[in-house]
Image: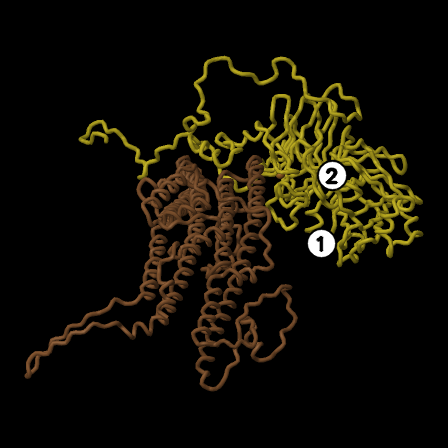
Chain colours: A brown, B yellow
Amino acid sequence: MTAGLAGCASFSPDGGFAPVEAAAKDRLGKDVRWARTAADGEMMAQRVAELLAQPALSPDDAVQLALFNNRGLQARFTELGITEAELVQAGRMANPGFTFGRLKSVDGVEIERGIHLSLARLIAMPLIYGAEARRFERVKREVTMDMLALAAETRRAWVQAVAANETLRYMQQVKEAADASAELARRMEQAGNFNKLTRAREQSFYADAALGLARADRAQRATRERLTRLLGLWGAQTQFRLPERLPDLPAQPKDQPDIERLAMSQRLDVQAARLAAEQTARNLGLTRTTRFINVLELGLARNKLEDGARQTGYDIALELPLFDWGGARVARAEAIYMQAVQLTAWAAIDARSEVREAYGNYRTAYDIALHQRDEVVPVRKRISEEQQLRYNGMIIGVFELLADARAQVAGVNGYINSLRDFWLAQAELDMALVGRASLSLPTGPVAGGMAGGGAAH
Amino acid sequence: MSSRRNFLRGAGAITAAASAAAVSRVAMAALPEPVLQTRPDTMPPLVPSTGRPYNPCVTLNGWTLPWRMNNGVKEFHLVAEPVVREMSADFKAHLWGYNGQSPGPTIEVVEGDRVRIFVTNKLGELTSIHWHGQRLPNGMDGVTGLNQPGIPPGKTFVYEFVARRPGTFMYHPHADEMVQMAMGMMGFWITHPKAKHPLIDEVDRDFVFLLNAYDIDPGSYTPKIMTMLDFNLWSWNSRIFPGIDPLVVRKNDKVRIRIGNLTMTNHPIHLHGHEFLVTGTDGGPTPKSTRQYEVTTDIAVGQMRQIDFLADEEGDWAFHCHKSHHTMNAMGHDVPTMIGVDHRGVARQITKLIPDYMVMGERGMKDMTEMEMPLPDNTAAMMAGRGPFGSVGMGGMFSVVKVRKDQKPGDYTDPGWYQHPPGTVAYEFGGALPEPARFKAEGPGSMPALKRPTTPTEVKVRKPAGGHSGH
Ligand SMILES: [Cu+2]
């Protein structure tokens, strides 16, 4: 037994990093490095410098940068090392111990010397090693998951930061319009054409606009700092540049009819649950498989119920072996195993629901952004054009024209926000396809979208 | 140019639509064919070829309805229907009217005529016609529900009465009256005297028009029928200046103008260069003892006035409502006054957001007449009329009486602008003048704010002797 273990009890060449690297490549199309040597560190610093030298940081650049430069992620990688060390340790014989006892009694001093090998340790070694090996696997998955989560988080932060920049620019325009109307109102009062009330009303637009600008300014700073943190940047590096605008809405939203199956095949939490169930079976010594059960139809399988007609047009199976349980003595084993099976089903059902939700969010966000772009913004523009014509004909005054300009700016900003929400939904969907995603709850519908339009009369 | 369409031979569509269930072919054959007018221009007077002779009048931007004699009865056919009325060259309104136009054609008859008027309803709702000011049998007065049932869509009713007294009258619906009048249903009626009348002088030219008002949002076509007083288009015969024709006369013509008011407010109608007498009202000719020379006569709601004057001064004479808002076309009622407001800096700031922004109104509204800027579709420029010396700065209820010595009798064509004899036009003073305060774009305000005292001003009297040295 000892001989059998000896082979395993050495460090792997990749330190457990290979699956992380593979996930980065397959899932993100990005490189990820674990800075274990000075050369690694230098190479990564150089790549970071190159990325930062770009005229504007694209979302992919940002993700790559985070994978190289986020210290938290590097710290997580070291956990691989720690765990593997513990695994290797568990696979090695403990050092022989030496005991020296000196007991003093009425009869004199009794000295006991002994050299021992921990027999218990030797006996328990396969168990401990197995547990450590499973822990190592788990840590690998967790680190992979964290790496993917960081990528998703970075993508989201990038979107937020760029959108906040755009919003800030628009709020500056709104403030400019409000400035102009406030100043004009002041002069109107000075010339005797406005009373204090009318002037105050115009002034209040200015006050609101200034508030809006301050809020946009704060959001811009906060979102940028958040991105800066995820990218692990400090000092002069924080001067990194972002594009002026969010990427345009894609011509078509992604159509993914088999999104649930995709999630089943690649979600790390589902895979982990299934592995855990299989491990449990092995630990319990369950070997005689009678058939496989689809964990997603677990309840039905056990109740011997027929599934109704499926409407989605595709099938997802996530199967685990079902064992022939012997006598009552294996009742505990059965319960333990079935618990693992249920946990797998739970993970799978949650995963399916999450991807459905994430995909629904994505499609809705797309439709909303499209509507904002193709309906709301053009309508606002048309209103502004018509208002300009009315101003030309002295049918409305300059204050109505300014109010309308503010409304038009708000309409454009509404599109920026919806485009931001679309890209966030896209990042959440990508995340939901590989692991547990933090899906944001939708905000309630906003009543009366047409705020601030020039008063008609 | 009148286009005549026969109900029987004409487009089957009309017959089918109007009469599928309503008017039988036999009944239709008994009707005088309705005459439609397709143009909004002033039509030449309709000289009577049948019936008693009379001196025809001219409807400003309108026309007179032809009739047929049927066993000594004058038969007219009015068709109430939706129409598109060109109110000025750049503005058309979707109205309801009669025989292709709003207002409908003028009906001219002679005192003592027996008149039979067929009224066909081609609207979607009941209508009726009230013969405003006439003496007639009660059942012919046209008030729906009171004197008759409403004329249902597709049906034709007949009114018949004798035009008993000479004078100036109107006709308009008395069914869903607020809506149908707001939509432009109205017309003029003249009863000429059958013989020489001691109170009715013979005149050379006899013009008629109705005062009417609409509320049509700039860029739209249909009047807002719920508007009570805040109309934005003040018109004569549903035309607005500069879309209104001039009143062309020959020098020394005796001129009569008959005006009926079917708006919701009074109009002080003012003539330049001449004095006139009010020779007739709703009640007929005025006694001579009551006549006095005037240059403005106020015409109240629902009233008619007939004014006579001798056009003995050559020139182009303004003729308009003296309520100055009524000589404006569609304009905002809520536009802030910008007079005297300094735009330095602000204009540039606004232009950044609104590239087409242009400062207007610091000097007043005359800017409007000097800038050619795009307006909403189907919107009459506010004060677009141009004269020989530039913009007239007028719209709405404004026209020109053109008096020319060489205008032929009976010729109503526009003779062009008046050629002033040398030395008879106001001219620029050649001497030195202090520069008046003006708005200068991006320059100092034309009217700096007065520093008004915060405490009431006291008159300070310097006393000949006293310790109080003024402070
Ligand atoms: Cu008036």
Q: Is residue A238 left or right of residue B347?
A: left
**Disc 2: which chain?**
B
Determine which residue is flagged by label 1: B176
Does B388 sit above or below residue A358? above
Q: Nearest to the eye among marks 1 and 2: give it.
A: 1
Does B260 sit above or below residue A366? above
Q: State which quarter of the image contains the C terminus of chain B.
A: top left
**Residue appearing at x 63%, y 26% in the figure:** B386
Q: Position of residue B155 (x, y in %)?
A: 83, 54
- Mark-to-mark CA distance, 1 and 2: 32 Å
Residue B293 makes an appearance in the image: no
Determine which residue is flagged by label 2: B285
Amino acid type, mark 2: Pro
Rate crowding at label 1 as few (under 14), some (14 to 19) or many (20 or more) other CA atoms within 10 Å.
some
Amino acid type, mark 1: Asp
Whereabouts is ligand 1, in terms of quadrant? top right
Q: Position of residue B204 (x, y in %)?
A: 77, 28
Q: Is residue A25 left or right of residue B317?
A: left
Q: Which corner quadrant of the image does residue B260 belong to?
A: top right
Residue B12 makes an appearance in the image: yes
Q: State which quarter of the image contains the N terminus of chain B.
A: top right
Considering every residue shown, the one lying at the far bottom of the view is A328
**Disc 1: which chain?**
B
Q: Is residue A74 left or right of residue B319?
A: left
Q: SS of the residue at dot 1? A: loop
Depth check: give the residue in front, A140 or B135: A140
